């Protein structure tokens, strides 16, 4: 019989590739939640959002289901469709900027530290 291994030991064996895959999936999950929240806050059905974005209802369903990796063009179309602004930023210590921190707290932005 094999020796028992604790989760702490297994977790320590994660590879860089696995870490990148996990982070990628986390971004996709955040995006699907964002699409759903923006759509419902705008009072739109998937079909209505799709029409505003110039796409199909099934494409919106895939976005909400985490089945897509959005392009900048898709993000721009989404922002316009729900009457929101798209902000993409680069900078040092963005977590310390109070206005950006408020966006994060309100669920309108995600800050990731540079690896």
Image (cartoon, grey):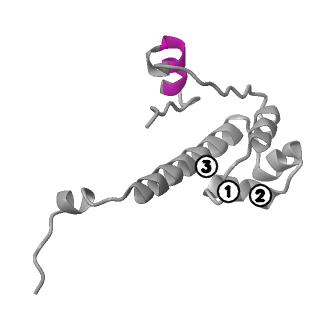
Residue nearer the viewer, 70 or 54 = 70
Classify mark 1: helix, strand or loop. loop
Say which residue appears at 67% left-offset and 56% top-offset: 68
- Residue furthest to the bottom in view is 1
Residue 52: give x, y in percent of width and height: 87, 42
- Residue furthest to the top in view is 98
Residue 100: give x, y in percent of width and height: 54, 18
Say which residue appears at 26% left-offset and 58% top-offset: 11
Q: Which residues are magenta?
A: 97-104
Q: Main secondary structure of the magenta part?
A: helix
- Mark 3 touching mark 2, by CB under 8 A? no
Any magenta on residue 78?
A: no
Closer to viewer: mark 1 or mark 2: 1
Say left or right for 17 vs 66: left
Residue nearer the viewer, 75 or 1 = 1
Q: How many marks?
A: 3
Say whether disc 1 or disc 2 marks the residue closer to the N-terminus.
Answer: 2
| Residue 67 against residue 90 in the figure, above or below | below
| Residue 89 against residue 4 in the figure, above or below | above
Report the residue marked by disc 2: 59
Report the residue marked by disc 3: 32
- Mark 1 touching mark 2, by CB under 8 A? yes
Report the residue marked by disc 1: 68
Residue 106: give x, y in percent of width and height: 52, 26
Cα distance between the residues tagged 3 and 2 = 12 Å
Any magenta on residue 98?
A: yes
């Amino acid at each position: 019989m094999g020796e028992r291994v604790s989760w702490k030991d297994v977790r320590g064996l994660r590879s860089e590739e696995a870490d990148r895959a996990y982070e990628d999936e986390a971004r996709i999950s955040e995006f699907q939640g964002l699409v759903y929240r923006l759509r419902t806050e705008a009072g739109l059905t998937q079909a209505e959002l799709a029409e505003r974005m110039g796409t199909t209802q099934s494409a919106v369903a895939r976005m909400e289901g985490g089945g897509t990796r959005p392009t900048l063009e898709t993000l721009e179309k989404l922002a316009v469709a729900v009457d929101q602004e798209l902000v993409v930023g680069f900078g040092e210590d963005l977590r310390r900027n109070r206005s950006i921190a408020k966006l994060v707290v309100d669920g309108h932005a995600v800050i990731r530290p540079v690896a």
